[in-house]
Each structure stands twice: as structure tokens, then as C-alpha cells.
Image: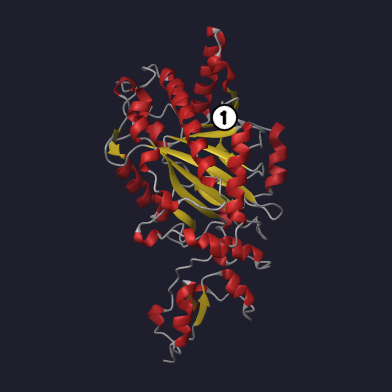
Amino acid sequence: MAPTEVTILPSRVESLASSETKAIPPKELAIFAPSSRVESLANNEIKAIPPKQVAIFAPSYRVESLASSGIQAIPEEYIRPEEERKSIFDVFEEEKKYDSGPQIPVIDLKGIDSEDKIVREKCMEELKKAAMEWGVMHIINHGISDDLINRLKAAGKAFFDLPIEEKEVYANDTASGKISGYGSKLANNASGQLEWEDYFFHLIFPEDKRDMSDWPKTPSDYIEVTSEYARRLRGLVTKVLTILSLGLGVEEGRLEKEVGGMEELLMQLKINYYPKCPQPELALGVEAHTDISALTFILHNMVPGLQVFYGGNWVTAKCVPDSIILHIGDTLEILSNGKYKSILHRGLVNKEKVRISWAVFCEPPKEKIVLKPLPVLVTDTEPALFTPRTFAQHIQQKLFKNGTQEAVLISKEV
């Protein structure tokens, strides 16, 4: 039997684009290796490799490089299954359907600080209702200044505007367990499908648990502005958890205590970068999922993309100025015994505009706390819907379901 011919490709698509390659080889005939090793591979005198080793597929290239290479068709690994593609449409047209069906509620938090008890209770009831019926909402008058948010967005965009070589200094290494840093999805599920995004991921609070070696040094104000945003957002986390605790009929500090309190609740920032996609009707920026967190807070650059699955249909989130999107995560769904909903959601991409989002996941410590429905919410008529588990065990359960470690270890969001 003749040996199988193999094409050895550098992992960075910009290197591939600058070569004389006319087409992306099928993955079973390609080795994708880190670019630093391609030279050593080429210097060897290998002519072929045994067939069993042909399907080595460990891409570490960036979607940004792929998008900027001028390709007209996306590689097959990014193409969603046919059944899923039936629900993927033009995101800008979908956003225009705002008045034609149910839409993610907008909650004005200004009333929560009112001296008028009726105004306060009305605000609390609206947030509680959104958490129970939708599990997602736009919050306005949230108390974080527009100036700070604009500076945060400018710093994140400036990082992704850097040449890829400079961003690679901060590359993560999920194979070795280093999930913080600059990355791209390697394998999204057992079929090897990929998502159309690059990202930067790191812990931003509590401050004494941060690893500052993971933080970008460029732009120069990234650390200052991100740290300030984390502090301001941490106050908002407490405010929301207080409202949701009272909404369950328990003491106001109960949910905060259950997820670790000020000392143990972790806030992880993931900046998602979704390049323009030549075939957005075939791809997703982030596949359908629920968050493992207690709460997730999302900012974006006013380019639509988020969709939530509500009432049997995908609903596209409208871009609401000066708002933060708030998601209820699995952790609060468990603690509330299903009263608060962790909604299924995903991210669309488009061919016209780059989309960037800033997602902060508020997560309990992995081992210190056992997650289970609050005892007061469990009755004979409303038995516990979830078995007790640590946060780490919950991650493992989702890992097993998804068939991939990275899909869970690096929190997803759109």
C-alpha cells in the first residue's frame, strides 16, 4: 500500500494565506501544528506519515487571520449541521423584527434606590419576573458610568487591534490547563465543529486572586480601566443578588452567601472577538448553550448577535443603548430550584461588521460550596429538581454532555 501524501501547514492562517496554497486541504490530509514547529517539521526529511497518524488535527490558528485572508468560503469545520442552519438568518434583518414578537425585557434599575417603597417594589418585581420567565434581560440605569464603560470597550478593542504576533504573547494553552489568555476554540464538540471567534479570558475579581501576568500590557490603560470596571460591577452583582434573594422569599444576603460572598465569588472576563464571516448563514460565533455561572453580565459594541431560545423560537436581542445584558446562569437555577431560568442562547455572526462583547461570569468556588436547591424552596408539591453537586461536579456533568473539555472550562458567552 502506497503511503498517504500529507500537506504540512503552519497553524497561523496568515502564513497559509501568504503561501501558494490554492485550497484548504481536507483535514484528514493535513497536519496543523504550532507555527514555531513548522520549520523543524519542514527540515526533517519526512515524505509521508503512516495512515493512522494522518488525522492529526490541532489547529491553533486564529479566526481573525482566517477572516482577513480573503477566503470566500469557510472551512468545513466551521459549518454547522444542516438542521441547525435552518434557523440561522441575517442578524441585521432579525434585529428589525423587534416589534413582531416577544422580546428580551428591559429593566430600569433606577427605581431600586427610590425612597418610595412602591417604586422600589415595582422594580424588584420586574427584575424577578424577567429572571423567572426569561432568564435574561437588558438592565439600564445600572450605576456604572458611560465613561467607564466606553473606556473599557476602547481598551478591549485596542488589544484586538494589535497585530496577531503581539496578541500571541498572551496565548493560552488549554492542553496544559492554562485557560487564561488569548485563544481560539480548538474543538467545540465530538464532531470537531469550531466557532467563529477569538477571545481573551482572565480572572478580574477578587483582586487578591488575580494573576496579573495574564493581563495585557497594551494598551497602557487596560489594567486600570478593567480593574475599575470589576470593582463597580461587583457592587452591581450584590445589588442583583439581593433583589433575587428577596424575590425567593429568603433573607437578602442569602444568594450571595450561597455563591461564595465577597471573598470567594469569582468574576471571569471573556472578551469575545467575532470577525466578519464570508458565509454567516453557515456558522455560529458561539453555539447554543446555557451558562454555568450564577450571573453573567455582557457589554457589546452595539453590533447584534445574541439570540435566546424562548417560546420555541430564537429571539434576537435588540441593541439597547447604555444597557448591560444580564443572564441567569445554571448556578442560580439550581439554588432557586428552577424558579429562575438559565436560558439557552447562542451568537450569530455577519459579513459586514466585527462584533466584540465583554462577558463577566460570576462563579462560585469550585469545591468549597455544595450547590443544591435552597431548603425553603423544596416541598412535597415542589420537590428538588437538582441533586447536590459542587461547582466542579456541575462542570464535569456539562463536560460529559458536551463531549469537550474546553467548551466548559472556558466559559462561553456572546
Expressed as whole percent of the image width and height from the top left, the position of residue 13 reads 58, 69
Here the colouring is secondary structure
Residue at 57% across, 54% down: 83
Q: In which quarter of the image is the C terminus?
A: top right
Q: In which quarter of the image is residue 209?
A: top left
Q: Name the residue under label 1.
A: 144
Towards the viewer: 164 or 222: 222
Q: Is residue 348 left or right of residue 38?
A: right
Q: Quadrant of the N terminus?
A: bottom left
Q: Classify mark 1: residues with Cα within 10 Å, few (<14), some (14-19) or many (20+).
A: some
Q: Is mark 1 on a helix, strand or loop?
A: loop
Q: What residue type is labelled 1?
A: Ile
Q: How many marks?
A: 1
Expressed as whole percent of the image width and height from the top left, the position of residue 46 reads 43, 89
Expressed as whole percent of the image width and height from the top left, the position of residue 148 reads 59, 35
- Residue 391 seen: yes
Expressed as whole percent of the image width and height from the top left, the position of residue 51 reads 41, 82
Towards the viewer: 305 or 386: 305
Towards the viewer: 144 or 189: 144
Q: Is residue 6 left or right of residue 408?
A: right
Up/down of 264 relative to 159, above or below: above
Residue at 41% across, 37% down: 330
Q: Is residue 223 left or right of residue 315?
A: left
Q: In which quarter of the image is residue 25?
A: bottom right
Among all residues in the image, which is located at the extreme front? 220
Up/down of 19 relative to 153, above or below: below
- Residue 259 seen: no
